[in-house]
Image (tube, rainbow, N blue to C red):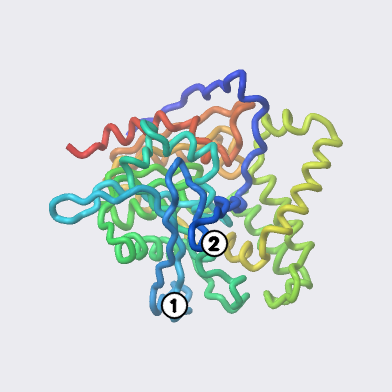
């Protein structure tokens, strides 16, 4: 195992001011475009039209003891699976999203334009990329579909089991070239590496810590949960209209969790600019989120704690965090201690700069794509 601290990439002179940091909220889906016969199809990602689908898991038993007769897991795939002589897929890459997001967040330019093109690390002419929507997120089954607070109370264990079922039973992939994930997906990547250590060639967790969520990270999550549950308009989850105060407070906390001090000071250089960003974000968050969905998604982290089983990981791990991450502050030293227990692990800390994006640096691939390419090169099948 080894650790790496290196200089942050310098933005080119044409890049302009850094974009706002990405909070742990949903991405807009790729726009639909007309297709022949009146149908619609998703816009290309990295020059490739995604294939979308729904995998139905029958009689899904949650760790809470609750069940669903049918659990729907939505997903997109990019590229074409390649099979060896025995029929096994050899080029599948699983990419896992963050809290309240979806697989569609990886269509953003800062991710797709850096990774998916010809000659890039995840070149879609070479790889078959799987982008699931987790339980409670995106197009998968979630409280806002109609069950509201009667939807089963899922945790990260449930989500990872459903991801695995999609990959193995739904897409018939029994080994992955790479498992990578951002934020919540980062935590899921650690869980994959421990639960199915022989099922992947490499692992790349981005923006998390391989330990129980505690301290400030748990604190802001608990604040979001309480803000929703203590709003009288939440009505125990059976509201007729969205509880606006609850969503406002949740949005505030998630914005702070995703903030980046240096970039934010440049983006909001005076009082009026900062106030306008808050007002815009309040309106946007309330218009694009459901209170139950947010509550369930944030609460799902309660069963996450991979710290006891790090020695079980056998695949090479490239673990990446950023120096300005509010959620996973580097001064805790947890990452450095944990990676020493991973047999084939490497930790990279991206220094904070005016170009980084706080917790959301995980989706700005230019900061870590060279490391990803090295990981893929070093684990290539001979």
227 vs 365, nearest the viewer:
365
Quadrant occupied by the N terminus: top left
Tell me where residue 151 appears, x and y as whole percent.
56, 75
Q: Give x and y (percent) for residue 297.
A: 57, 62
Q: CA distance from mark 1 to mark 2?
A: 16 Å
Dividing the picture into quarters, in which one does residue 267 lie? Answer: top right
Q: Residue at x 40, y 65 (%)?
A: 162
- Where does the image place residue 40, in percent across and percent down from the top left? 52, 59
Q: Secondary structure at mark 2?
A: loop
**Residue for badge 1:** 70
Give whichever of discs 1 and 2 has the lower sequence position: 1
Residue 106 vertical placement versus 120 (above, below)? below
Q: Is residue 164 above or below residue 50?
A: below
Q: Which residue is depicted at the point 37% across and 63% down?
A: 166
Q: Which mark is residue 37?
A: none
Is residue 152 visible in the rendered image? The answer is yes
Mark 2 sits on what residue? 137
Label 1 element class? strand
Examine the rendered structure and indicate whether residue 1 appears above or below residue 313.
above
Specify whether 89 is left or right of 249.
Answer: left
Q: Please give the name of the residue rendered at 64% of the width and 39% of the height, measured from the top-left corner.
A: 21
Residue 255 drawn above or below residue 237: above
């Amino acid at each position: 195992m080894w650790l790496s601290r290196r200089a942050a990439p310098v933005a080119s002179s044409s890049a302009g001011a850094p974009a706002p940091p990405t909070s742990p909220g949903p991405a807009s889906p790729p726009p639909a475009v007309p297709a022949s016969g009146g149908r619609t199809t998703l816009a290309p990602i990295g020059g490739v039209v995604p294939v979308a689908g729904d995998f139905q898991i029958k009689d899904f038993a949650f760790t809470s003891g609750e069940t669903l007769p049918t659990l729907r897991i939505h997903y997109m795939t990019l590229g074409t699976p390649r099979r060896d002589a025995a029929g096994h897929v050899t080029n599948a890459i699983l990419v896992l999203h963050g809290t309240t997001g979806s697989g569609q967040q990886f269509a953003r330019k800062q991710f797709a334009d850096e990774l998916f093109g010809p000659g890039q690390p995840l070149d879609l002419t070479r790889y078959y990329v799987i982008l699931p929507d987790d339980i409670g997120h995106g197009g998968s089954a979630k409280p806002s579909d109609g069950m509201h607070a009667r939807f089963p109370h899922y945790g990260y264990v449930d989500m990872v089991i459903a991801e695995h079922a999609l990959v193995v039973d739904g897409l018939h992939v029994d080994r992955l070239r790479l498992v990578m994930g951002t934020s919540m997906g980062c935590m899921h990547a650690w869980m994959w590496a421990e639960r199915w250590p022989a099922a992947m060639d490499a692992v790349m967790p981005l923006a998390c810590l391989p330990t129980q969520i505690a301290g400030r990270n748990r604190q802001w999550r608990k604040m979001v949960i309480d803000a929703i549950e203590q709003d009288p308009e939440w009505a125990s989850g059976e509201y007729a209209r969205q509880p606006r105060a609850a969503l406002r407070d949740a949005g505030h906390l998630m914005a702070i969790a995703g903030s980046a001090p240096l970039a934010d000071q440049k983006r909001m250089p005076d009082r009026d600019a900062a106030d306008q960003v808050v007002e815009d974000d309040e309106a946007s968050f309330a218009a694009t989120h459901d209170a139950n969905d947010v509550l369930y998604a944030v609460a799902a982290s309660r069963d996450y704690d991979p710290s006891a089983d790090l020695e079980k990981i056998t695949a090479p791990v490239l673990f990446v965090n950023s120096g300005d991450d509010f959620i996973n502050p580097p001064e805790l030293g947890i990452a450095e201690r944990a990676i020493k227990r991973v047999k084939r692990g490497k930790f990279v800390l991206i220094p904070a700069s005016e170009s980084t994006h706080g917790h959301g640096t995980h989706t700005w691939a230019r900061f870590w794509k060279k490391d990803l390419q090295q990981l893929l090169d070093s684990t290539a099948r001979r």
